[in-house]
Structures are given as C-alpha cells and as structure tokens.
C-alpha cells in the first residue's frame, strides 16, 4: 500500500487516470469509476464520471462525493461544483447528473457493519463549526493553532465526514497519518512535506487522498477550510 499522498484533482479536473472498478458489489456507479487507491480492506478513492440518471436500489458501501465539475441532484437537492455529500450504505433513490459531471470520491465498505441512516447528507461549509483540538503539542513547531470542525456523518464502518478549518498559522513535524483521509480544500493553501519526497503546495480546488501511515509535515500560513472524510 502506498505511503504517499495521491493528488486526485485540481479545479474540477482529474490528475490521474486510475483503473476501472467497483466500490462494492453491485456498485451502481461502477461504469464511471476510476480507482486510484485501494487498500484491500474496503477503502477506495478516486474519481467518477456521471451523466444522466442512475437509480440506486441499495448502496453496498458508504461514500463521500465532492463535486469537481457539473451538477448532481439527489433527493431534490442540487449539488453544484465545489459541494459535497455523503451517500450512506443502504441509500436508495435516483441520482441525476448533468452531462460531464465529475465527482471525487472515497468509499468504504464493511460487510458486517450494521446499516444506519440511509438518507443522503449534504456537507454545508456555511454551517457553524465547533472549536476542536489541533495537533498534539509535542509535534507542533508553531504556536497552538485555532481549529474548528463539524462532523456531519459517522457510520458503524468507521467512516466520518464533515468540514474542518484551521484559522491561524500552523506548522507541525512529520507524523505518520493516523487514518485514511480525503481532503478537498475549499479555502487557503497548505504545504505538505513527505519525509523522503519533499514538499508540495496545495490550494483551494485541490482534492488529495492521504493514506494511513503516510509520513507528512503540515504548514499553513493563512486560514484553510476543507471537506474531509476519514476512516481507519
């Protein structure tokens, strides 16, 4: 399994081809999927091309979708470019996509996890977020940052999704990533430095996937806001 982040896309465009595949058995979106990460334990990430109406009978996995380009309509709610939603395991109903819609995704399936809420959940960055703990003091290079988060989805498989921000400068040392994480940056800029491969700068519009165990340092000098999905 890779220990390097995967830059899935920028400004609504994919940056790698990936391989065709399904996120779970009877995946209704399999025809359009490109999988760039698969840990062999039910975690998959990549991008998805959609157009027209897909009728979902009962989704076999939970999935975060961030819309890079185009538009989705789910349960009467419109999700345009830059928006995000979660389809829980067991979700059923039509998903309508404008022609040429591109979605970045992370999906997790755990066959023995009980199904919970099955309605689609929008991740709204305009909702108020609560103060949250930042990095542990022993890994900080900067002063403790001010962070906020709003977790909007948790299921029994361990997948969580929501919105997070850091509103003050933050720099931390190399830390192996504790979980798999998809980040879709909505605001700001961050430098992520791999312990052996050096730094890379990401900004609003970038979608990246950081695998569990990947050793990265983080540095931001201004406010950063992101959608996140984490699982381990």
Image: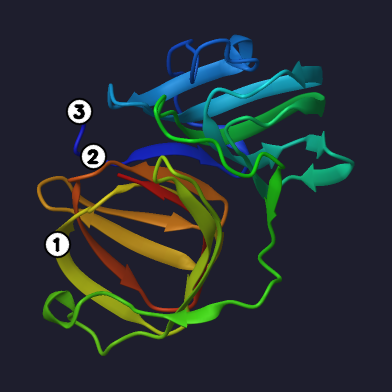
- Quarter of the image where one finds residue 96: top right
Q: Nearer the viewer, residue 10 or 23?
A: 23
Between discs 1 and 2, the one toward the N terminus: 2
Secondary structure of the residue carrying numbered label 3: loop
The disc label shown at residue 174, or none = 1
Q: Which residue is mark 2?
A: 4
Contact, CB < 8 Å: mark 2 with mark 3?
no
Secondary structure of the residue carrying numbered label 2: loop
Between discs 1 and 3, the one toward the N terminus: 3
Contact, CB < 8 Å: mark 1 with mark 3?
no
- Mark 2 against mark 3, which lies toward the viewer? 3
- Looking at the image, the residue that sits furthest to the bottom is 143
- Quarter of the image where one finds residue 218: bottom left
Query: Which quadrant would the C terminus be assigned to in this image?
Result: top left
Q: Residue at x 69, y 61 (%)?
A: 124
Camera sees residue 83? no
Residue 196: percent from left, percent from top: 10, 47
Q: Which residue is mark 3?
A: 1
Q: Pointer 2: residues within 10 angstroms few (<14), some, or many (20+)?
A: some
């Amino acid at each position: 399994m890779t220990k390097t982040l995967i830059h899935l896309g920028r400004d609504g465009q994919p940056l790698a081809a990936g391989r065709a595949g399904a996120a779970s058995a009877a995946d209704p979106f399999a025809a359009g999927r490109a999988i760039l990460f698969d840990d062999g334990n039910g975690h998959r990430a990549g991008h998805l091309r959609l157009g027209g109406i897909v009728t979902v009978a009962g989704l076999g996995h939970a999935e975060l979708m961030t819309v890079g380009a185009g538009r989705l309509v789910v349960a009467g709610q419109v999700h345009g470019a830059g928006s995000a939603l979660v389809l829980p395991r067991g979700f059923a109903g039509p998903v309508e996509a404008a022609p040429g819609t591109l979605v970045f995704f992370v999906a997790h399936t755990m066959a023995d996890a009980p199904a919970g809420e099955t309605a689609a959940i929008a991740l709204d960055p305009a909702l108020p977020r609560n103060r949250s703990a930042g990095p542990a003091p022993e890994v900080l290079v900067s002063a403790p940052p001010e962070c906020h988060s709003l977790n909007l989805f948790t299921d029994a498989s361990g997948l969580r999704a929501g919105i997070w921000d850091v509103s003050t400068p933050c720099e931390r040392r190399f830390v192996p990533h504790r979980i798999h994480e998809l980040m879709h940056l909505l605001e700001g800029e961050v430098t992520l430095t791999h312990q052996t491969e050096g730094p890379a700068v990401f900004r609003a519009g970038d979608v990246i996937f950081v695998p569990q165990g990947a050793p990265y340092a983080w540095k931001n000098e201004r406010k950063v806001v992101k959608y996140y999905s984490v699982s381990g």
